[in-house]
Image: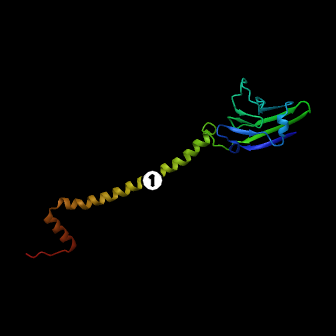
């Protein structure tokens, strides 16, 4: 009997890795039967575990925890699980296909990440430069108009300033 399950990496994520459970289609009595062997393999067919923890056994580098009911590995990968019962000639094969929906690292998608950063930062920089340019232009115009207006008052003495103000507002004819 062969089945396939599609899993989301987020859904099988554990504190220290990714936990794959033995499918419920395999009876627990089969898992407990001494005549039945179970094995977990990666997509390439490399043996990971037999579902039992042995004290002196060298574990595969990906395997973090193992039991008859599940396996926890350090990476979210496609796995194959099989149970073969020699006496009854029963064989259960289950394939786990994963959808990697975890956050992508910079190593996995460098071009798209860099282009996303550039497409966000570049417009922000241009907007800031535009705003600074507008304020600078506006400030310089006000400063020049103040300088021209203050130039008259700096050159004229207080008495002359009054005369200038008076002559500018109403023209007078002087009598001799």
Residue farthest toward the left in the current orientation of the protein:
176
Quarter of the image with the C terminus in it: bottom left
- Residue at 28%, 60% (x, y): give it: 146
Horizontal side of residue 131 vs 149, given as left or right: right
- Image coordinates of residue 154 in percent, x first then y, are 19, 59
The residue where tag 1 is placed is 130
- Residue at 70%, 33% (x, y): give it: 65
- Image coordinates of residue 112 in percent, x first then y, are 61, 42
- Image coordinates of residue 93 in percent, x first then y, are 84, 37
| Image position of 107 with respect to 158: above or below | above
Which of these two is toward me, 116 or 75?
75
Horizontal side of residue 153 vs 140, given as left or right: left
Which of these two is toward me, 157 or 22?
22
- Residue at 30%, 57% (x, y): give it: 144
- Image coordinates of residue 28 in percent, x first then y, are 82, 39
Q: How many marks?
A: 1
Residue farthest toward the right in the current orientation of the protein:
88
Crowding around mark 1 (Cα neighbors within 10 Å: few <14, some 14 to 19, many 20+) is few
């Amino acid at each position: 009997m062969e089945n396939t399950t599609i899993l989301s990496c987020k859904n099988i994520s554990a504190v220290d890795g990714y936990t794959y459970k033995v499918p419920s289609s395999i009876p627990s009595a089969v898992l407990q039967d001494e005549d039945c062997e179970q094995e977990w393999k990666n997509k390439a067919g490399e043996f990971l575990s037999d579902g039992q923890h042995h004290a002196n056994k060298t574990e595969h580098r990906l395997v973090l925890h193992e039991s008859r009911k599940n396996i926890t590995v350090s990476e979210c990968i496609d796995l194959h699980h099989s149970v073969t019962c020699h006496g009854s000639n029963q064989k259960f094969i289950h394939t786990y296909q994963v959808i990697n929906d975890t956050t992508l690292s910079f190593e996995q998608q460098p071009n798209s990440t860099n282009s996303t950063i550039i497409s966000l930062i570049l417009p922000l920089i241009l907007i800031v430069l535009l705003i600074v340019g507008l304020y600078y232009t506006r400030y310089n115009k006000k400063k020049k108009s103040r300088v021209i207006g203050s130039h008259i008052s700096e050159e004229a003495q207080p008495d002359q300033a009054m005369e200038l103000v008076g002559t500018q507002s109403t023209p007078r004819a002087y009598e001799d």
